[in-house]
Image: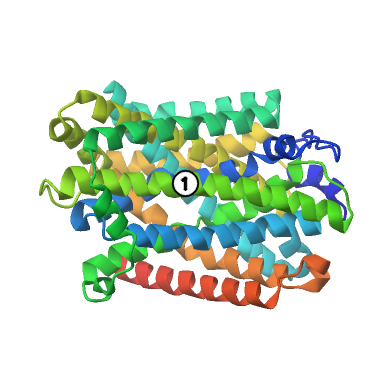
Amino acid sequence: MGTSQSSRVFSDLERVITVKASDSFWKKVLLYMGPGFLVAVGYVDPGNWATDLAAGSTFGYTLLFVIFISNLFALLLQYLAAKLGIASGQNLAQICRARFPRRVNIFLWILAEIMIIACDTAEVVGSAIGINLLFHIPILLAIGITIGDVLLLLLLQRRGFRYLEAFVISLIGIIIVCFALELFFSQPQLSAILYGLIPTTEIFKNQQLLYLGIGILGATVMPHNLYLHSALVQTRTYGDTYEAKKEALKFSTIDSFAALTIALLVNMSILILSAATFHVKGVGQIVELGQAYQLLAPLLGTVVASTVFAIALIAAGQSSTVTATLAGQIVMEGFVNLQLPPWIRRLGVRILAITPALLAVLIFGENALGNLLILTQVILSLQLSFAVFPLIFFTSSKKVMGRFANSLPVRIAAIITGTIIAALNLWLVITVL
C-alpha cells in the first residue's frame, strides 16, 4: 500500500509538504513538525483543565506524578498511531474498514462520530467560557460566536495545510506564554513540585485522591487523536522503501515527542498554578473554570492573572476545535468512505456540538456548563478502548505492518497500557455515573 492513498483519506487536505532526501537533518525536523502539535492540543483542551484545577486546589502538588505517567502512555500510543499511518499508507479508520466486517465498522463509526461531537462540545464550552470571561459577553452569545471557528478553519485550509499547522502551533505558543506568566505570578515552591513528581502510596488510601488521579490518567489520551495522527503523518512526502519509511517515522517521533512534552508542561503548569494559588492559601477545591478566573486576580494581586487565564482558555478551545473537526472528516471517510464538502461536515458537527451547550444554559443555567464539560470527558473515556485496542492489534500484525510490526516488548507495553487505561476509564465512568 503506497503512501499516495493519503489524498483519499481527507480529500481537502492535499499532501503538498515535500521532504527531499537531500534536506539536512534540521530542515527535515522543521518540515515534519506539525502533526504532533495538532495531536498535542487534545491533551491540553478545556476538558482537561477542570481535572487539573480540582487536583491542584484539593491536594496541592501530589498528583503531578500521575500527569507524568499519563504522558508516557500518550507517547507510546501516539507513536503507534504514527507508525501505523507511515508503514501501511492508511489511517486507523481505513484499516478497520478493510479488515473488520461491515457491521463492526458501522458500530465503530457511530461511536467515533459521538466521540467527535463530545470532543467538539468540550471545545465549544471552553471557548465560550473564555470569551464570556474575557469580554463579558453573555454566555449564549459567546456560544454562538464559536460558529466562527468553522469559517476560520475553512479559510486556513484553503491557504494550505501548513498554514493550519502554523495557526495551531501559534495558539500553543500563546498557551505556553500565558502559563509561564501565571507561574511567575503564583511563585510555586520548586521543592514541592519535585516532591510531587515522586509516586506516593497515599493515592490508594484516599478515595478522592484516587478519583482525581484516575480522572487525570483516564481522560488524558483522546481517542480521536489516534485516528487523526495516523492520517496526518501522511501529509508529508516520503518513499515506499523500508529505509524511507523508517526515516519518516524517526522524524515523526521527534515531532510527537516535542509536542507532547510541551503538552505535559502545560498540564503540569495548570496543576501547579492551582496548587500554588488555591491549595496553599486554603481556598478549597476549584472545579469551575469561571471560579478559577474570578479568584486568580485577588489571590495573586494582579488583574493580569485572570486575563491571561481567559486568553489561554480561548487559545486551548480554538486549537482543539481544529483537530476535532479534522478527525471527524477522517473517521467518516475512513470507516464508510463517505465524503462531504468540508464546510457541510464542519458546520454540521459544530451545530451538533453547540446544541447541548445551548440547551444546558437555557434549561439549567450557566453553572450547568461545568457538568456538561465533565460529561463530555466521560463520553470520551467510554470511546477510548474502541480506538486503542484496534490500534494495538493492527500495529502488532505483520500482514499490516510488515517489518514495522511491534516487537514483543512494545507489544507487551502497549497491551499493559491499553488495559490500564480501559480499566481506569471504566472505573471512572461507573464512579461518575
Q: In this view, does 265 lie above or below 378?
A: above
Label 1 packing within 10 angstroms: few (<14), some (14-19), many (20+):
many
Q: In which quarter of the image is residue 217?
A: bottom left
- Identify the coloring: rainbow
Q: Is mark 1 on a helix, strand or loop?
A: helix
State the residue at coordinates (57%, 42%). 37
Q: In this view, does 353 lie above or below 113?
A: above
From this viewpoint, is residue 140 visible? no
Q: At label 1, which amino acid type do we have?
A: Ala
Q: Name the residue under label 1.
A: 263
The quarter of the rendered structure image containing the C terminus is bottom left
The quarter of the rendered structure image containing the N terminus is bottom right
State the residue at coordinates (44%, 37%). 317
State the residue at coordinates (41%, 53%). 376
Residue 6 image offset from top left, x and y in percent: 79, 46
Position of 110 compared to 123: left or right?
Answer: right
From this viewpoint, is residue 369 visible? yes
Of residues 39 and 249, the one drawn nearer to the viewer in this rendering: 249
Residue 182 image offset from top left, x and y in percent: 29, 34
Position of 279 compared to 383: left or right?
Answer: left
Position of 179 compared to 149: left or right?
Answer: left
Q: Is residue 314 above or below residue 237?
A: above
List the single residue furthest toward the front: 191
Position of 273 compared to 28: left or right?
Answer: left
